[in-house]
Amino acid sequence: MMNKTLTRMDLGEAVFREVGLSRNESAALVESVLGHMSDALADGNSVKISSFGTFSVRDKNARVGRNPKTGEEVPILPRRVLTFRPSHLMKDQVAAGNKG
Amino acid sequence: MIRSELVQIIADENPHLYQRDVERIVSTVFEQIIDAMARGDRVELRGFGAFSVKKREARVGRNPRTGESVQVEEKHVPFFKTGKALRDRLNGR
């Protein structure tokens, strides 16, 4: 089976088919969904989408890392990372769809 | 932020749309992502992140209560990798 990659364009197209707004407006609305989620996350809030999953922001402490190629020690500064926890529905659909 | 808050923000910004249409728009986006992954496809949203499917090989697991060995089948799990622009924004860059 050939796997493909979906992009914003495919999501815009799906909104266009589903809701019947113009292609331009559909694309802008997809962008708006992603933009508002990004804004909330950048503010340090978590984004909880029922039956999809939860995006949360976690603080990581500073630690000493190592360049795997040279073995050189490099400091890794404290930083914030995003984690995504898929919903049960997503896990079940993904598991069922890719079975066998 | 939860789903209904996201819908409300977008509805407020688009007074010409019915609230139920905004709900359908938001649901469509998330359903499309799940459907794609269920087909084994990847979803790449530049600047936000990418959703993909990872394969977990079959293994011999253990019942932690009884210590008994159990065969765990191969399975596929959803995976999300944060996009560079969003990762930078989280760190105030």
Image (cartoon, helix red, strand yellow):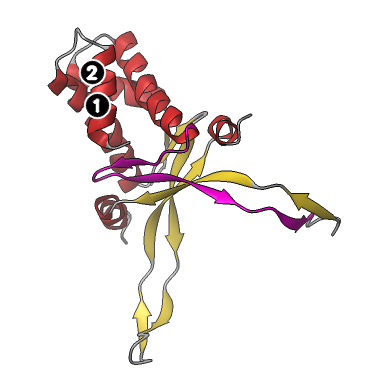
Quarter holding the C terminus of chain A? bottom left
A64 left or right of A29 in image: right
Residue A39: which numbered mark, if any? Answer: none
Q: Quadrant of residue A29?
A: top left
- Horizontal relation, residue A68 to residue A86: left or right: right
Residue B87 screen position, x and y as percent: 57, 36
Residue B66, how many percent across, how many down?
Answer: 33, 92
Q: Point out which mark residue B7 bears.
A: 1
Q: Amino acid at mark 2?
A: Ala
Q: Nearer the viewer, residue B65 or A69?
A: B65
Q: Name the chief secondary structure element in magenta.
A: strand
The answer to if A62 sits in the magenta stretch is yes
- Which residues fall within the magenta stretch? A43-67
Q: CA–CA distance between discs 2 and 1?
A: 6 Å
Q: Amino acid at mark 1?
A: Val
State whether residue B72 is above or below residue B70.
Answer: above
In the picture of the structure, the residue carrying the numbered disc 2 is B11
Residue at (36% x, 81% y) in the render:
B71
Q: Nearer the viewer, residue A76 or A10?
A: A76
Seen at 35% across and 72% down, the residue is: B73
Report crowding for label 1: few under 14, some 14 to 19, many 20 or more residues within 10 A (C-alpha): many
Q: On the picture, is B16 further left or further right than B68?
A: left
Q: Are marks 2 and 1 in contact (CB under 8 Å)?
A: yes
Q: Position of residue A61 (x, y in %)?
A: 64, 54
Q: Do tags 2 and 1 sit on the same chain?
A: yes
Secondary structure category for the residue under label 1: helix
